[in-house]
Amino acid sequence: MAGKVVVVVGVPGVGKTTVINEAVRQAKEAGLQFQVLNFGDVMLELALSQGLVENRDEIRKLRVDTQMALQAEAARDIAKRASSSSVILDTHAIIKTSQGYWPGLPEPVVKALHPNHIVVVEADPQAVISRRAKDQGIRNRSDDLTAEELRFTMEVNRQAAISSAVLSGASVVFVKNEEGKAGEAAAQIVALIK
Ligand code: ATP
Ligand code: AMP
Ligand code: MG
C-alpha cells in the first residue's frame, strides 16, 4: 500500500468522526493528500443492500456471524480503496455485541489493512455520556451507561487496540479529545500522515 494508513478507534460517542472531520480541514490547509474511509459506512451499505438493518446502530445487534461476514467484505473493499494513497480509517477496535465484546480489527482485517498507526481516541467518561445524550434521536448508542461502565469499555478498547497492533506491527497512539478541543486531537492525527 502506498502512503500511511491511520486507523482511528474509540468508544461510540467519544468523537472519532468529529475529530477526523477536523483533521480533514487541517490536512487540506496543509496541502496533504489522503482519503478518509468509514468502516461503518461500508458495512451499512452492504447491510442495507441485504435488507439486514435500517440504520448503522442496528449493525452491532445482528448475529455475530452475520457481522463477521459483513466485516470481511467491508475489509476487502476498504483495503482495495486504500491501496493508492494515505488513509484515515474511522472504525472500532471492539464492538459490544449481544454475544460479547468482538474485535473490529481481528487478524484477517488488520492484515488486509496494514495500518502504520492505531489511534485510540479517549475522553473523560462524563463527557462521553453528555455527547451521547446530545446525539439522542440521531444515533442510538445505549444512553444508559454509567461512567464506570464506560471506563471499563474504554479499557477494553485499549487492550483490543494493543492486540491488533501486535498482529500488524502498528504503533498505538492515545489521543485525548477534550471538551471543545477536537482541533487539538485532530492535529495529533494530522501529524501522523505528514
Ligand atoms: P460513533 O462511534 O458512534 O460513530 P464517534 O466517536 O464518531 O461515535 P462523534 O459522532 O464524532 O463520535 O461525536 C459524538 C458527539 O460528541 C457529537 O455530538 C459531537 O459533536 C460531540 N463531540 C465530539 N468531540 C467533541 C469535543 N471535543 N467537544 C465537544 N463535543 C464533542
Ligand atoms: P460507526 O458509525 O463508526 O459507529 O459505525 C457504525 C457501525 O459499523 C458500528 O457501530 C459497528 O457495528 C460497525 N463497524 C464499524 N467498524 C467496524 C469494524 N471494524 N468491525 C465490525 N464492525 C464495525
Ligand atoms: Mg462516528
Image (spheres, helix red, strand yellow):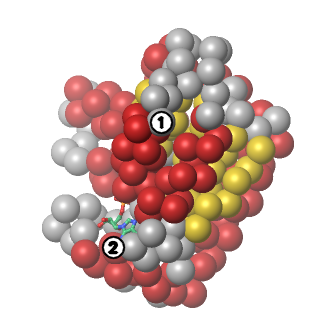
Label 1 belongs to which residue? 30
Q: Determine the CA span between mark 2 and mark 1.
A: 32 Å
Q: Please state the horizontal and vertical placement of residue 56, each as a whole percent of the image.
A: 29, 48
Q: Confirm whether residue 19 shows in the render.
A: yes
Identify the residue shown where x is 58% and y is 68%: 176
| Nearer the observer, 67 or 82 | 82
Amino acid under disc 1: Ala
Say if mark 2 contacts mark 1, CB within 8 Å: no
The mark closer to the camera, 2 or 1, is 1
- As displayed, is residue 74 above or below residue 184? above
Residue topped by disc 2 = 132
Crowding around mark 1 (Cα neighbors within 10 Å: few <14, some 14 to 19, many 20+) is few
> What label sits on residue 77 in the rendered view?
none
How many numbered dots are placed on residues in this image?
A: 2
Quarter of the render that holds ligand 1: bottom left
Relative horizontal placement of residue 83, taking residue 171 as reference (left or right): left
Question: Residue 192 at what x, y percent from top left?
Answer: 64, 41
Q: Is residue 177 left or right of residue 154?
A: left
Say which element carries label 1: loop
Q: Quadrant of residue 4?
A: top right
